[in-house]
Every structure is written in C-alpha cells, then in structure tokens.
Image (cartoon, rainbow, N blue to C red):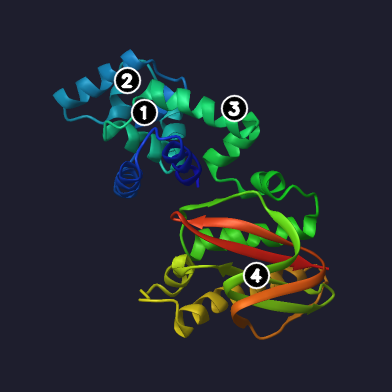
C-alpha cells in the first residue's frame, strides 16, 4: 500500500514521472530489500557504517549480517529484527527509488515530510500507511466511527490485497443517497443487517478487479469480466456472513446484480470509497442498515 500512496504523491507533485514510478514498482516486485538500508532507516547503523559493511561484503564471501556482528555494530537479535522487516512495502519502494537513481535518501525523507504535512496525517497514520495497517487507516479515510461499516470495508480491502492485488490505495469516502456509474457489480444482503456491497467504475479500470480475482486477462469490460467482479463481491460477502454467524448475527445474500449505465438510489446515505488498484480507479460501495 505504501508505494501506491507515496508513489502517487510523487507523480502528482512531479518529483518523479509516471514511467519512473512504473519502473520502481517492477524493481520492487523483483528485488529483496538490503539489510543495510533498513538498519540505516531504523537508526541502528550510520550511513558510514552501512557503506563500510557494503564495501566489506564486496571484498569477502560473508553475509551483511555476519559482518555487522563481527564489527560489533549489530547483535544477532538486531539482525533477526531487520530480517523481519525485509518484506516491508515501505523499504521495498525506498530501495527501488534509490537503486534506480531516481531519488536519494535525503530527497525521499524530505518528500515524506512534505507528503505528511500536505495530507495532514499524524505520525500514527503515516506508520499505518508504511505498514499497510488497514484498520488504522479506515477511520481517517471513511471519517466515521461506525464499527459495522469499518469492519465490512476493512474486510473488502483486505481481500482485495489477498485475492486481487497488494498494490492498493484508497481516497476519502463520500456519503450519498444516489450514485451513478457506467458499470456496477453489487450484492444485497438481508436479515439482521440489510445493505449491499459492490464495486463500480466508469471505464475499463474495473478490469483490474476482474483480472486480479479471476487470474486471467479480459480484452474489454464484457459480461465475463463483470461476472468476475460480481463473484469477488460474493466472496467478500460470504466471508462477512460467516464472520457474523460466529457472533450470532444472521444475514442472507441475494444473487449478485450487474448494472450498466445505472443509478443506485437509497432513502438513507451509503458509503462510496475511491479505490486504486495498481493506479486503476474504481469505487467500493457499501451500505449497512
């Protein structure tokens, strides 16, 4: 998630180009994060120490961690901690920016500070973005304390990451009684909680959901593609129904609906969350009564 939030900011502010962002994403997918970069960022090594260890590693057949322990810079527990951070999307993207000579460490740090200031994010929210902590992000982006809504939105986003793509970001939600879109795939639920959940889009960006979930390519937004989106909606609602049943709450899922050039109108407001999957924009739509 971090690469999508911070990368889109860098492109928007013209600090990097769209092509550079794309190349960083490809590099991050294929590369393992260096321990020295993480240790420096975590304040466990100075830049001089990290460079020294990198140089020594080129001169010997030893791992970075072993050299750091030999030099007395780090302990075995330090190395274990750093290894645990190697899968961090934050460090993957930072390394991609540096290794591709797009931005250096100081430029990245300054840009992060500007991003936080311009977005009005607290340190806690910045940490949540770096760590991909959806639960901490949602109250800020949905601007609500409604636990039912937050739980369902969180479930939907976690399953996008799980089944569709981990390269996800969201924008501030809006609350409306009427919403129109070229394509809508959604499913109503009835029982102890009435409402709906689904996805909408005004162009072929919705294919990012269809292709990610179905694990196949679609040439256009046709019935098969929208069926895949509807099936993903059914998957999310199925998990939601199972989760509620453990708590003694019962809901039934109606068959998914696929609409074209349509408007959803309700007597009460529902939530519309802009979502970006690998920079392709759709909307997550949710209502819970």
Marks 3 and 2, how far apart at CA: 29 Å
Q: Would you say the residues marked 3 and 2 are in contact, meaning their CB atoms lie under 8 Å apart? A: no
Q: Would you say the residues marked 1 and 2 are in contact, meaning their CB atoms lie under 8 Å apart? A: yes
Label 4, on which residue? Answer: 180
Is tag 1's residue or tag 3's residue first in the polypeptide sequence?
A: 1
**What is the secondary structure assignment of the residue under circle 3?**
helix
- Which of label 3 and label 2 is nearer to you? 3
Which residue is depicted at the point 56% across and 63% down?
159
**What is the secondary structure assignment of the residue under circle 2?**
helix
Label 2, on which residue? Answer: 50
Q: Nearer the viewer, residue 170 or 202?
A: 202
Q: Would you say the residues marked 1 and 3 are in contact, meaning their CB atoms lie under 8 Å apart? A: no
Left or right of 174, for residue 190: right
Residue 259's spot in the image, x, y percent?
60, 80
Marks 4 and 3, how far apart at CA: 34 Å
Q: Is residue 178 above or below residue 224?
A: above
Label 3, on which residue? Answer: 117
């Amino acid at each position: 998630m971090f690469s999508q939030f911070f990368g889109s900011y860098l492109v928007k502010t013209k600090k990097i180009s769209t092509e550079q962002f794309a190349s960083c994403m490809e590099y991050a997918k294929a590369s393992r994060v260096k321990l020295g970069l993480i240790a420096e960022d975590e304040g466990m090594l100075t830049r001089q120490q990290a460079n020294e260890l990198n140089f020594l590693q080129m001169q010997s057949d030893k791992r970075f961690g072993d050299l750091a322990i030999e030099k007395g810079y780090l302990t075995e527990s330090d190395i274990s901690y750093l290894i645990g951070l190697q899968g961090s999307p934050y460090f993957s993207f930072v390394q991609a920016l540096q290794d591709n000579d797009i931005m250096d460490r100081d430029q990245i740090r300054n840009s992060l500070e500007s991003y936080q200031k311009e977005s009005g994010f607290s340190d806690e929210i910045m940490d949540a973005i770096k760590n991909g902590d959806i639960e901490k992000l949602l109250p800020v982006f949905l601007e609500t304390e409604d636990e039912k809504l937050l739980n369902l939105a969180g479930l939907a986003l976690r399953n996008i990451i799980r089944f569709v793509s981990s390269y996800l970001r969201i924008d501030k939600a809006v609350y409306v009684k009427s919403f129109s879109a070229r394509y809508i795939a959604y499913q109503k639920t009835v029982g102890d909680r009435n409402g709906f959940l689904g996805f909408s889009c005004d162009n072929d960006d919705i294919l990012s959901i269809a292709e990610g979930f179905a694990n196949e390519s679609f040439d256009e937004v046709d019935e098969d593609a929208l069926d895949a989106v509807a099936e993903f909606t059914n998957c999310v609602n199925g998990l939601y129904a199972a989760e509620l049943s453990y708590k003694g709450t019962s809901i039934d899922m109606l068959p998914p609906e696929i609409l074209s050039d349509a408007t959803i109108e309700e007597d009460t407001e529902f939530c519309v969350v802009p979502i970006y999957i690998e920079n392709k924009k759709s909307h997550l739509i949710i209502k819970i009564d």
